[in-house]
Amino acid sequence: MIDERAPGEGLPEGFLELPGLIYGHDEQWIPEDSEAVGRAFALENPWFSQGRAVLLAVPGAARLALFFQPGLSVEGRSVAFFGYWESAGVDAADAQVFERAAELARSWGAEEIYGPINFTTFGNYRLRLSCEPGGYTFPDEPYNPSRYSSLLEGAGFELDQMYLTQVGNIETGRVVREWKRPEQEALLLSGYRIDTLTHALWMDSLPELHGLVDHIFGRNFAYSPLSYESFADKCGESFIRRACPHTSVMAWGPEGDVAGFFLVYPHYGPLVVQGAGEGRVPVSSLDFEQHNEALTALPWRGCVAKTVGVSPVHRGKGVMGALTVSVFDRGDGRYENWFGAMIRKGNLSRNYADGNIDGERWYGLFRKRL
């Protein structure tokens, strides 16, 4: 029997308990933040001023949340998203939640369902399809049993979009930065400036960045815009305090406007995965200033190059290459392993490291026509 609830009505029975049943003692799983899930579905979440959702669960067997924003479309077709999906592998329960989700999506006017996507692509999304042996999971990276892709296909979904994380080392960075060094030098000579992106600089620039994100990322697949309130909540202090303030960079145009930015994070995996044991740090508590010392004490030092964007008016001028060189310059001697995180297949930025990587992780986004 499905427990179905609207936001503000509390979470369905067993919704929070199911991941623990599925992942048990899986050392590479990053435990879910139960309090954050509860807050996400409270009516105080500013996202509900622009969208609607419903939560579905069969206790001990399956769970799913369905999201819909009126006017949001992909390739001209109205879409709904599903997220927070977990399955214990009970066929009847899986069928129940997906059939009910499809029924609701149709009633809201959706023609297709995409997922997994938690609320929007600003949140966690995609399914992990492969990983190098023994690889640490990093915060915000999809993590799931390998059987999940087959479960989705059995429910009528098809793999629609693919993404990858490129795994490299310090030599990767050195090769790429010398290849792109002339672009950086030419850009700086033309009047651009690149600064280290400190936490304070990010927060001071937040209003201007919100005005830019739609222009920078608006053509990304399944992108949905955020109000400033939602953007500040999602990308404000709790977001930026995890970033490396020594390696992240921001570019300014000759007129002093933001031309682009590149956010880099320490690979917090060793601190946050379930295998970290009693000393595990919750992802919501991560803070570079508090936790970098513990990371540098480890024999394995990695970083995640996760978010890069260039303002449309500054594209085609070498900003991307210049930012990349600046990141690798600042990271040399600080990080030994580099993760170019979750690049959409076909994105030319993946070519920066092609031929100089040690491995790849692949992810997928799935679609079902209604």
Image (cartoon, rainbow, N blue to C red):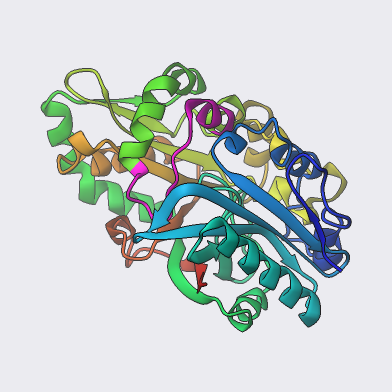
From the viewer's side, name the closer residue of 224 and 86. Answer: 224
From the viewer's side, name the closer residue of 126 and 222. Answer: 222
From the viewer's side, name the closer residue of 12 and 306. Answer: 12
Indicate whether residue 241 is drawn in magenta. no
Across and down, in percent, residue 185 comes to: 16, 34
Across and down, in percent, residue 2 comes to: 82, 65
From the viewer's side, name the closer residue of 204 and 189. Answer: 204
Q: Quadrant of the N terminus?
A: bottom right
Read off the magenta span. Answer: 217-234
Q: From the viewer's perspective, is residue 312 above or below residue 192?
A: below
Residue positioned most to the front: 107
Across and down, in percent, residue 25 comes to: 84, 64
Q: From the viewer's perspective, is residue 157 above or below residue 183?
A: below
Position of residue 208 in the picture relative to residue 25 (left or right) = left
Asked whether the viewer can see residue 165, the reply is yes
Position of residue 110 in the picture relative to residue 208 (left or right) = right
Q: From the viewer's perspective, is residue 130 above or below residue 141?
A: below
Indicate whether residue 233 is drawn in magenta. yes
Q: Residue at x 48, y 31 (%)?
A: 227
In which image quadrant can residue 106 be found? bottom right
Q: Residue at x 44, y 64 (%)?
A: 163
Asked whether the viewer can see residue 334, the reply is no
Q: Residue at x 76, y 59 (%)?
A: 56
